[in-house]
Image: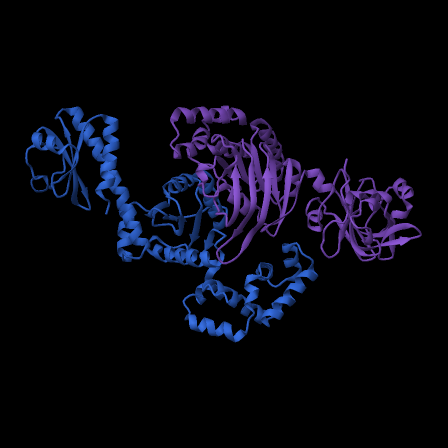
Amino acid sequence: MIGYDIIKKVAYDIQKNIQMPIYIIDKSGNLIYGDKDFFEKKAGFLKINVEYIDEKEIYEVGEFICYNIFYNDALFCTIALEGKDEQSKKVLYLISLIFEQLLQKYNREEFLIEALTGKLSVNLVSYYAEKYKINKNVKYTVAIVESNNDIDDAIKIITNIFDKGNLYTVKFDDKRFAVIFSYKGNNSLIELYKTMKDMIESEGYMKVKIASSSSFVPIEDIHIAYREAEIALLIGKKLEDEKGIYIYEDYSFAEILWGIDIEKVNNFIKKRNIDFGIFKDEELIQTLNAFFRNSLNLSETARELYIHRNTLVYRLDKIFKMTGLDAKNFDDAVLLKTIMTLTKLYDISR
Amino acid sequence: MADVVLKHVYKVYPGGVTAVKDFNLEIQDKEFIVLVGPSGCGKTTTLRMIAGLEEISQGELYIDGKLVNDVPPKDRDIAMVFQNYALYPHMTVYDNMAFGLKLRKVPRAEIDRKVKEAARILGLEEYLNRKPKALSGGQRQRVALGRAIVRNPKVFLMDEPLSNLDAKLRVQMRTELAKLHDRLQTTFIYVTHDQTEAMTMGTRIVVMKDGVIQQVDKPQTIYDYPSNLFVAGFIGSPQMNFIDARLENKNGKVYATFKGFSVLVPEGILKRLKDPSYVGKEIVLGIRPEDLHDEEVFLEAYPEAVVEAKVEVTELMGPETFLYLDVNGVSLTARVDPRTRAKAGDVIKIGFDINKLHMFDKETEMTILNRVIS
């Protein structure tokens, strides 16, 4: 639920511009914004929450005109202005519109948070999606954007980069927000995320990490996509923190390994009798990663690493001596990849 | 305007990956320095550390004399232009350039002044009210640069800003960036994997590999005096030819011998040998493609530097022709005059410009020649 703090902040901004005192009464009838003594003196003791609780039009109380703002069909707060002339009524109506739209926005954001975290049934998601005019005829993917800084500027940048339709941002806290979007661009998703990251970092001066679902799901299932993005963020940061962009489908192998009993992991690694020096030797780890990336192709790997083929063979022999596993052999390569992933996932360093 | 100094800078990621090792560099005020190297060499990480987007694991970074290791990016007086930029499609050129300043709550009048000044510098004044889709590719790129210029930074940081452009536009923007640097008189730090960009734009080039600086020098010096095999191979296209050879003394003359051929090593090169004991040892001989010749006049002038080669492929490039040659199992590429009569399958004579020989230690891969001091 939207808090009154934001209501008060917006009221302050409006008052500053229109140069007219605004008064706000919460749903319990307490004056939460404006000069209390003055208001009570001019309006008298009143119980708006009782006497005018269902009033949907502008009404008069003492020397004030009031307007009720509703949230989910219940009174949320009442806005009051001094004066009864037509001009004041117009101003009150305009102010009320601002607050209603603010609530509408927060309503939708609140709904999206609950939908993303799987707290709403499919039927409810469908109902609210329609209510908040979210297109149900397209499929969505979800990205989580995380930063060590306040991410408000990042949200502004993202919402301005893309076409308005079918893109929603949801702020979870000061450091994290989700982007729900239907993407039909020509570039790949990874290119899109690179653009998001480069733009936030260069325009917003903040480092971000972006994790994405791989699924394109109907709005009713966005909790699945959000879960995927969360897993990608968790595993991506463990395996390749430096990358900064993590796509769920890249971590399906690690996801299978994630959650294994740590004792089993230790026993498995112990049985292989591995020299753990290999995991501290960056050159060898880089070589192995490149070798896997190039589907165990010696020439391609040597080219990528800017080394001679013989140098690559020498390094692979060194790995064999340290691990007893020959990376050129597919079965051994699978084992090496598994051990490398496990040591990073579980931060095992002997 | 500022100088940037990196002292013994390291970047180690959680999990132990060391992306940058003992990086030492003094970038002068108003310099256009280019960090170049293959993917994963640490150039982007270095730039991001200067930007404040990556923490420095160890070492010190100074901008304009101030230690900025713990200063957040927005307070470093820098501006960034990255590879994957986008313009805000619903905003005008003016608003695109103003947006970053609005985020920083810069007063409206100041924004207006800065945007108009940047537009003037970039020749965008008449396009300020246009939306991005009404601009050409080059104009869009200029708007992206404009967003950085309006910040009036002491240092511009650019990470492959031209990589997503088509080849023609890239060449055009290369020139524009160089001109912009002249006009702004500000420090530019530019990252690229493209050695042509590095050679054409940088006042100095930093060649990196595996997180380590390989060489820092002016473009021509790097080209003429590469400090090791990697730099020699990375800078120059087509890349330098490398031949496993042996330096042999025959009747008072020294030759580089390989695969049954001998190429005379002239006095000038011998004098530059860091250690005379290389004579008699295995070395790696380097020769750039443009220093191999098939013209009759050249072959006659240097008879002791001629080998026989089988032409495998010829590539006519317009102003030059590339010959891909086989010299008893050694592959060489020669860049020759397009009027050459050599064609695939021919066995031809090819001459080495012996004054342009490069030599490297076979084990350490470092150059074994001193530079010529002019």
Tell me the residue at 58%/26% (across/down): B183
Judge left or right: residue B329 versus residue B68.
Answer: right
Q: Is residue A285 visible?
A: yes
The picture places residue A38, in percent across and down from the top left corner, at 11, 30
Residue B351 or residue A5, whichever sits in front: A5
Residue at far bottom of view: A271
Judge left or right: residue B327 versus residue A227.
Answer: right
Tell me the residue at 63%/62% (across/down): A297
Residue B30 or residue B24, whichever sits in front: B24
Q: Which chain is purple?
A: B
Q: What number of labels is visible? A: 0
Judge left or right: residue B97 versus residue A47.
Answer: right
The picture places residue B59, in percent across and down from the top left corner, at 53, 47
The picture places residue B41, in percent across and down from the top left corner, at 59, 50
Q: Where A181 falls versus B161 (above or below)?
A: below
Q: Which chain is blue?
A: A
The picture places residue B253, in percent across and down from the top left corner, at 90, 49
Q: Is residue B44 visible?
A: no
Q: Which part of the image, by quadrant, shows the N terminus of chain B?
A: top right
Tell me the residue at 82%/39% (across/down): B339
